[in-house]
Amino acid sequence: SSATSPIKAAVKSEEERHSGPIVTRNALMWFRNDLRIRDNKALYAASMRSKVGGNNKFLVALYIVSEEEWAEHDEAPVKIDFWMRNLVTLTASLEKLGIPLVVKTAKEKTDVVKVVEEVVKGMDISHVFWSQELMVDERRRDRQVKEALLRHSGVYVEEHEDQLIVPAEDVRTKTGNPYAVFTPFYNTWCKLVESESHYLEITVTPDANPPKAKELYAEHFKTKSPSSHPHPLDVNEMKRRYPAGEDEAHARLEKFVQEKGKKYHQGRDVPHQDGTSVLSMYLNAGVLSTRQCIVAARIANKNKIQSGDDGLKTWIKELGWREFYRHILVAFPRVCMSRAFQPKTERVQWSDNNEHFQRWIEGKTGFPIVDAGMRQLKATGYMHNRLRMIVACFLVKDLLINWQQGEKYFMSTLIDGDLASNNGGWQWSASTGTDSQPYFRVFNPLLQSKRYDPKGDYIRRWVPELKMLTEQQIHEPSHALPPKEFAKLGYPKPIVDHAKAKDKYLTEFKRALALS
Ligand code: FAD
């Protein structure tokens, strides 16, 4: 079929580069952030390869647990737990295909090369497959593994594009440069996505007679695969909110597209209504691919991307933002190395008021909408997009605290923490990024609250001290209630005066930008 030919062609051309076919022994699929079996090009290619070369060749899957990498990226424990739970469902899906999963641990991140080499040597592997990652460190690691395997062991490595629907080098301005502004990027990107006239989901078929890899190499299967990871939230509640597995992700996708997709343009900005898909954690773990989401939305939208139903086209555009930030990461890797996209903004003198930062973290700033968002994050590992923008803007422009502190805290708490989208979202809010909101645009928390949570339902859900207040009182209780009544609530007064804080921020930002 047309889905298989490019892969076969790629296999052939690699073999030619190696001046003659490498004899196929066993194949290895190394899973990283692509924890799914459907629409997984690398897995598909690996399974094709293992069927070459006659009987008794097998495909084995590998996952490497690297605590040091998790710590370096500030990964949230609840996110690691979600990934480990998905690893369990992935193992079961692979078993059904006759593909056993080996789980290894790399004590230090530099051990990863050694671990892959050990598996390759120990299990007589001739071909290794994986899906490309975009981050600088991961790309460096992959180059090292590739080098070690290819040069030293004569093992063939095949990398497949997975993180981007359209390869980075294909989305270019007329002068051949990467885009730094969303709208022109999106217009070009949509044309390229639209030109994919049909879409064939590639699915791995089970081996009728899978060879007994587990018996042959029993020692590699001794380690027990982690099924959970300790985290501070309610374990059962997290399982209920974000159940693991590809089937679950697809059921959510279908339900969203059928029931909420067409109302998304209205529902997405009403935090208490849950009008969004809540699929980000599945997308980031690769349990679901962005391509699968676009396809589902396109089918419901008569194959259209930029026109058709208002809700669906808006949702596809959000997936476009996800892609945009990934393209930015590839084109301007400094953004993921703690640098601002606009270097001038690095001259801002940030506040080091740790008490303010802690109050922001705890959801005790005295601004109910900000506190509600921060408490949702703390309790569930997730925050609605509108709230992410409000609390980020508040940290930077009301408290004058460096956006990088906020970025780091989000990463260490979010179940959907993702370097590209998190960095993109923070730099957008802080006006330091590619296509950010202008620096002089400062959200007024009170107006945001009245506009997006007019009846106060979202605030009541997350800030129980304010539960009994009316919709007139709830947005600014310290103003709306007599001091004695307010004191009884046990809720803090605002930690800053918004108007003064805004002036201070504007003065400082202008100063930084004016310096040459
Ligand atoms: P939906 O509204 O249903 O959107 C569908 C998908 O589109 C999302 O799952 C997501 O993959 C993508 N998407 C939607 N909005 C954006 C956006 N603004 N930027 C990039 N992708 C988007 N998203 C993350 O996945 N991980 C993060 O760590 C992250 N950090 C953020 C930090 C800040 C300060 C801000 C402002 C935004 C951040 N976002 C992040 C983007 C966005 O808030 C979430 O993707 C979204 O809230 C997830 O909910 P959902 O799946 O219901 O989204």
Image: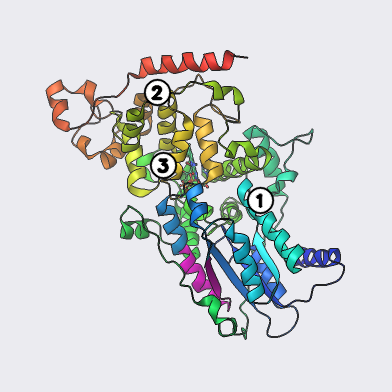
| Closer to us: 85 or 147 | 147
Q: Image point 44% across, 32% down: which residue?
A: 392
Specify whether residue 454 is in view: no
Q: What residue type is labelled 2?
A: Asp
Q: What residue type is labelled 3?
A: His
Residue under label 3: 384
Q: In which quarter of the image is residue 296?
A: bottom right
Q: Quadrant of the C terminus?
A: top right
Q: Image point 24% across, 27% down: which residue?
A: 472
Residue under label 2: 398
Can you tell which of label 3 and label 1 is closer to the viewer?
Answer: 1
Q: Quadrant of residue 335?
A: top right
- Colour pattern: rainbow
Tell me if mark 1 has few (under 14), some (14-19) or many (20+) residues whose alpha carbon lies within 10 angstroms of its own.
few
Q: What residue type is labelled 1?
A: Arg
Q: Quadrant of the N terminus?
A: bottom right
379 relative to 492, above or below: below
Residue 140 is tagged as: 1
State if disc 1 and disc 3 touch (CB < 8 Å).
no
Q: What element carries label 3?
A: loop
